Image (tube, helix red, strand yellow):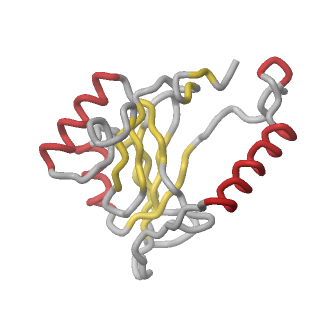
Amino acid sequence: MPQPEGNELEQVRARREVLREKYLRPKGSRPPTTVQGVHHLALICRDTEETIKFYQEFLGFPLVELVENRDYKGSNHFFFDIGNNNLLGFFDFPGHDHPAWMETIGGVQHLAISVSPAQFDAAKKNLDESGVDYLGPDRGVEESMYFRDPNGVGLELYREELGIFNGEPLLD
């Protein structure tokens, strides 16, 4: 994807500052959120078994439910435990074409998942041993590893505690 340069880049940066000034409230003056949290993120997969093997067997996210999609007969709806009462859900839609992933408006760019340093090291070893291509430590990014699942979904394993970004707490 082409990145802005020169004057266009300066305009993007200036617009960001306008938005920060207009909408980003200091920590002490932010209202409390109106939600309890993310119940689940629902994504689409090409192949249910391939997706289960990747998330449960390769990444270690336990499969906790597998049912028929209540809105689409013959489709599976299944969930993985990603910690702290958060779920990662998938649907398959048999008989539908599933084009290759592309970065576009409304699409998921990536899902960042917080992991401990020990889990991060184990995942890196797993990725290395399996030959999975990733961007991460020793490859330009220190606290993260970016790669794609079998469906093209971008994943980031982030060696950072929940609520922290670039070493700074975002929440009170």
Q: Is residue 170 left or right of residue 41?
A: right
Q: Residue 35: percent from the left, percent from the top?
A: 73, 35
User: Compared with residue 60, is residue 119 higher up or lower down, i.e. above or below?
Assistant: above
Report the residue at 65% width, 56% height from top. Answer: 9
Count of picture labels: 0
Q: Residue 134: percent from the left, percent from the top?
A: 29, 49
User: Compared with residue 33, is residue 80 higher up or lower down, i.e. above or below?
Assistant: below
Q: Quadrant of residue 116?
A: top left
Q: Residue 23: percent from the left, percent from the top?
A: 84, 39
Q: Nearer the viewer, residue 71 or 62?
A: 62
Q: Is residue 128 left or right of residue 103?
A: left
Q: Residue furthest left?
A: 129
Q: Nearer the viewer, residue 90 or 170?
A: 170
Q: Residue furthest front?
A: 6
User: Compared with residue 81, is residue 54 higher up or lower down, i.e. above or below?
Assistant: below
Q: Is residue 36 left or right of residue 143?
A: right
Report the residue at 44% width, 47% height from top. Answer: 79
Q: Is residue 67 left or right of residue 63?
A: right
Q: Residue 122: percent from the left, percent from the top?
A: 22, 31
Report the residue at 34% width, 51% height from top. Answer: 147
Q: Nearer the viewer, residue 28 or 38?
A: 28
The quadrant of the picture occupied by the C terminus is: top right
Report the residue at 22% width, 52% height from top. Answer: 132
